[in-house]
Image: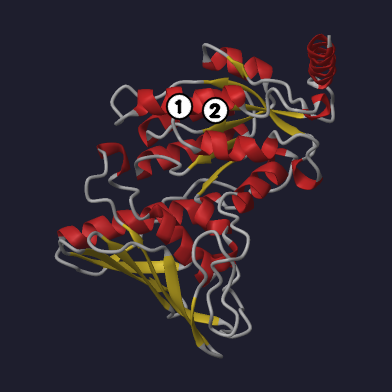
Amino acid sequence: MRCITSAIMVLVLSLCFSANAHSADLVRVGILGIDNFGSVAYTEFLNRPHAEGVFEGVRVVAAYPIGSNDYPDSDKLVASWKDQLTKMYQNPKDPKDAVPPIEFVNSTEELLKKCDVVMIFSMDGRLHLKQAEAVLKAGKRLFISRPLASSPEDAIAILKLSAETKTACWSSSQHRFSGGFSGMRNHPEVGRVIGCDVYGGWTVSAPDADKFTRPLHSIETLYTIMGGPGVVSVTCTSTPTTESITALWKDGRVGTYRGIKEGAVKYSATVFGEKGVSTSGIYGHGVPVNGIVPTTDKYVGYEGLATEIAKFFKGGPVPVTSAETLEIFALMQAAEESKAQNGAVVHLKNLSQGIGE
């Protein structure tokens, strides 16, 4: 009898949630493509029972669970993350914690009918332009998980369409909003940042779709600590153990990226400032205190970016401008050209010309 009563309570609460799904206060989020773990990671924040603060009133309601035909293990990843999304916050011990299940649909068109805003989580960046076209032409705010696209040409096309349709769109690595990195700007032990050496993994065996954007996590970290765009030229040296990129900012500051191909991998940086030199925090953790990097504090790997996504979907501004995103693509493009020219200095192209914010 108790089981029947509980089941009835869950059903009633689910119906109440469903009735409120079209409330003007609820921002209905749709997910396009789910083979990226981010589809699970960010939904865990947006669909929390009794969500408060920035996450209140924003919920993933539908997903189109597609992958890529020629991206490694895409089909397995789709199956795994779909299973987690299906079970997420279902069958709670207390019926008051019930959350409406995510509805899985069979087309982009069906997804767009059920949501107000969209997140793209296809691992294969080559798919993003076509996916983004449908969303932006429908006038729905869009977040695209890293990478924005697999090539500069596709990145330009997406952001140009965003400007033409006057529909906000952006992309970012979660590393950009990790406190151990963003907190290094004007850190009390460092002061104004003069330079920065970032290091992180460089996957030698990356699939074709990812080869151009391999350094993106760390390049976004570099831009975060250095305080934004302004790079004018790049040099790149490539060896079997390291991919080394040196970027010159227009104000004379220098930032570097060391892509680790062999040996231990860690995502962090050394920051040079007016007051001092310090190791940054590491991904997911806070800034150093008295030179000591915390590792036992609360891990907040995805929460920073999840917060920015929620604020954006509630009508907030784009956290990362098109100009900065395209400068990063221009930097990676220049690095490839420099490498092909045995480390020659290559000036960045203006990829954002003609694209308004």
Identity of the residue drawn at 45% across and 66% down = 222
Q: Quadrant of the N terminus?
A: top right
In front of the other: 129 or 278: 278
The residue wearing badge 2 is 84
Q: Nearer the viewer, residue 75 or 165?
A: 75
Q: Residues within 10 Å of mark 2 (few under 14, many from 20)?
A: some
The relative height of residue 291 versus residue 100 in the rendered view (above or below) is: below
- Quarter of the rendering containing residue 292: bottom right
Q: Position of residue 211 (x, y in %)?
A: 28, 45
Residue 80's tag is 1
Residue drawn at (67%, 48%), measured in percent from left and top? 307
Q: Is any part of residue 349 visible from this angle?
A: no
- Per the rendering, the mark at residue 41 is none
Q: Find residue 229 and report its horizontal and vertical position in percent.
A: 50, 64
- Residue type, mark 2 in image: Gln
Examine the rendering and report whether any part of residue 178 can be seen. Answer: yes
* Residue in view at x 60 percent, y 48 percent: 357
Q: Is residue 297 above or below residue 30?
A: below
Q: Amino acid at mark 1?
A: Ser
